[in-house]
Amino acid sequence: MSLVEALFGLLGVVALGAGLLVVTTRQLVHAALYLVVCLGAVAGCYLLLSAEFVAWVQVLIYVGAVVVLLLFGLMLTRAPIGVSTDLDAPPMQRVAAAVVALGLAAIIVVASVDAFRGEHIELSSDDVGGSSTAAGEAIFRSWVLPFEVLSVLLLAALVGAIVLSRRDIGDDREDGR
């Protein structure tokens, strides 16, 4: 086993462990920070696979933007910072959630393998580590609509967090103005 394979396995275990902590912790802020660790480990896996462009997109968009959006949403909506007992579910709901999650994961894996079987990005012969130009062209030629839909969804989430955090104007006024 080479050093790269060992690091890849270690990063995979870290990503899996942090992902499990995201969904099992009782503190919302800790869940967001575990998500940062999970997404950072996935970016490290991309780096080990010589996909530097995808790794930096992972860091900039997911770690930098999505998690910051999540943390701002938590802060703006005045969500509880400490341990939340409201986040606990009865054992039967946990089992049902695990079964649904595993079923959904299986469907996503099968659909992804079926959809992308035989797909590849053309790289030039002198480019050993991958071409960010070719990857960018493939993403924005074939996947521009889902990319834009995701950006609109994130914008709607940010606007929703701001609207939820607004206080009613009549509640704060004591002087009758």
Image (tube, rainbow, N blue to C red):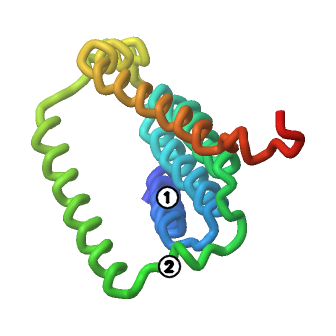
The crowding category of the residue bearing disc 1, from other C-alpha atoms within 10 Å (few below 14, some 14 to 19, many at least 20), is: many
Residue 9 position (above or below residue 63): below
Amino acid of disc 2 = Asp
Q: Give the quarter of the figure containing the N terminus.
A: bottom left
Residue named by callout 1: 15
| Residue at the image position 19 percent from the left and 60 percent from the top | 106
Evaluate whether residue 3 shows in this view. Answer: no
User: Residue 41: x, y in percent?
Assistant: 54, 51
Camera-side residue of 125 and 66: 66
- Image quadrant of residue 31? bottom right
Which mark is in front, 1 or 2? Answer: 2
User: Residue 107: x, y in percent?
Assistant: 16, 55
Camera-side residue of 51 and 104: 104
116 vs 170, left or right, is left
| Residue at the image position 20 percent from the left and 65 percent from the top | 103
Residue 36 position (above or below residue 69): below
